[in-house]
């Protein structure tokens, strides 16, 4: 996980208009115009604050610590499932890439690349951009399977594999990589919401022009299909599209394994979740909403929805 201050991302553009998203953090303004962000312009973070706020809660804006709690949001229709580009930094150097099924790799112009040519390219230093697989298929990188498309990018500094995958598939894998999938389902759900919120932050504020975030502990661990199980898929589906919001912005949800690590690494940064703590709370009978309330006091649940 990135050890940076939790921030609020305000979607300043109208969801019905083609405009850029402004991200403000530490006095820095970042303008993003990626294809993934364009998808977000047709979506909204929909938190009905009046519906989810308790009757006694003030509507005045206040700091995270001054507002009261995470509140439930009623399920509704279709939630948008945006594409995320994840740099497979754990797989550097890229040695073997194998599209599964009948799919192949191709150049940026669409010309097919044979397995023999691909192996030669990966051993070389030629700058190139290749696309492997399809959105519904899978690709093996160094023996590990990833769903969706894998882009192979070399800008003169060696090859990097970037997995283009839908947010919900990504979240299911992160949950299993960050928590044992046999843990209490409410802890898994809390992890799913935290992982989705964190991923959405980096969809709007990408780490690179070529990718949104990495797959290592510097961001949040993503292990592809290997860490996606029936239980992590269920936790993801049960919280589909839900993120944490505060004052109309999106909360970057920091978390760590234990409360000790949380205090050492994130103590000066504000709200952060202990994963082992979440498991203990779940075992005590708390729901994922109550768990999130303990760690992200003042936030509310919001749903990623398509406008209209």
Image: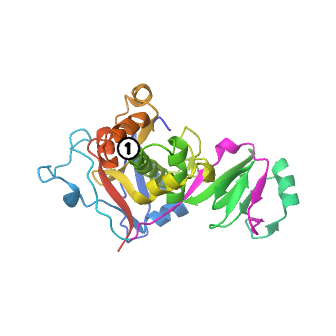
Residue 33 visible in the shown view: no
Whether residue 218 is visible, yes or no, is yes
Relative vertical location of residue 59 with respect to residue 277 in this rendering, above or below: below
Tell me if residue 96 is in the magenta stretch. Answer: yes
Left/right placement of residue 54 relative to residue 197 reads left
User: Is 304 situated above or below 199?
Assistant: below
Q: Position of residue 153 (x, y in %)?
A: 71, 53
Q: Could you tell me which residue is drawn at 53 percent across and 46 percent down?
A: 176
* Residue 93 falls in image quadrant: top right
- Residue 305, image quadrant: bottom left
Residue lying at 68% horizontally and 58% vertically, measured from the top left: 151
Number of marks: 1
Front position in the image: 38 or 233: 233
Relative side of 289 to 92, left or right: left
- Colour pattern of the rendering: rainbow
Is 234 colored magenta in this rendering? no
Is the residue marked by circle 1 packed among few (<14), some (14-19), or many (20+) residues within 10 Å?
Answer: some
Q: Mark 1 highlights which residue?
A: 7
Residue range highlighted in magenta: 78-107
Q: Secondary structure at mark 1?
A: loop
| Residue 66, image quadrant | top left
| The C terminus, quarter of image | bottom left
Q: Which residue of the protein is positioned furthest toward the left in this rendering?
A: 56
Where is residue 243 drawn, in percent x and y? 38, 53
Question: Residue shown at 58%/59% (left/top)?
Answer: 165
Q: Is residue 74 left or right of residue 257?
A: left
């Amino acid at each position: 996980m990135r050890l940076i201050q939790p921030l609020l991302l305000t979607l300043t553009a109208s969801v019905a208009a083609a405009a850029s998203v402004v991200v403000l953090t530490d006095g820095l303004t970042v303008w993003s115009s990626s294809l993934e962000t364009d998808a977000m312009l047709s979506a909204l973070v929909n938190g009905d604050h009046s519906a989810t706020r308790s009757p006694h809660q003030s509507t005045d804006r206040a700091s995270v610590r001054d507002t009261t709690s995470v509140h439930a949001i009623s399920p509704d229709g279709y939630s948008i499932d945006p594409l995320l580009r994840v740099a497979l930094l754990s797989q550097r150097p890229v040695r073997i890439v194998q599209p599964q099924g009948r799919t192949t790799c191709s150049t940026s112009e669409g010309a097919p690349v044979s397995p023999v040519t691909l192996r030669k390219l990966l051993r070389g230093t030629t700058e190139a951009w290749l696309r492997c697989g399809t959105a519904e298929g899978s690709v093996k990188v160094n023996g590990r399977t990833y769903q969706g498309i894998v882009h192979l990018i070399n800008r003169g500094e060696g090859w990097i594999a970037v997995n283009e995958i839908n947010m919900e598939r990504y979240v299911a894998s992160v949950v299993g990589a960050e928590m044992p999938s046999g843990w209490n389902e409410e802890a898994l759900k809390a992890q799913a919401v935290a992982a989705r919120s964190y991923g959405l932050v980096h969809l709007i504020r990408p780490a690179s022009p070529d990718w949104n975030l990495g797959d290592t502990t510097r961001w949040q661990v993503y292990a592809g299909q290997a860490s996606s199980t029936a239980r992590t898929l269920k936790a993801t589906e049960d919280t589909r599209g839900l993120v944490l919001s505060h004052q109309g912005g999106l909360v970057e949800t920091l978390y760590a394994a234990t409360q000790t690590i949380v205090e050492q690494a994130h103590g000066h940064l504000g709200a952060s979740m202990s994963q082992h703590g979440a498991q203990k709370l779940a075992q005590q009978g708390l729901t994922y909403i109550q768990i999130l309330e303990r760690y992200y006091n003042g936030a509310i649940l919001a749903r990623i929805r398509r406008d209209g």
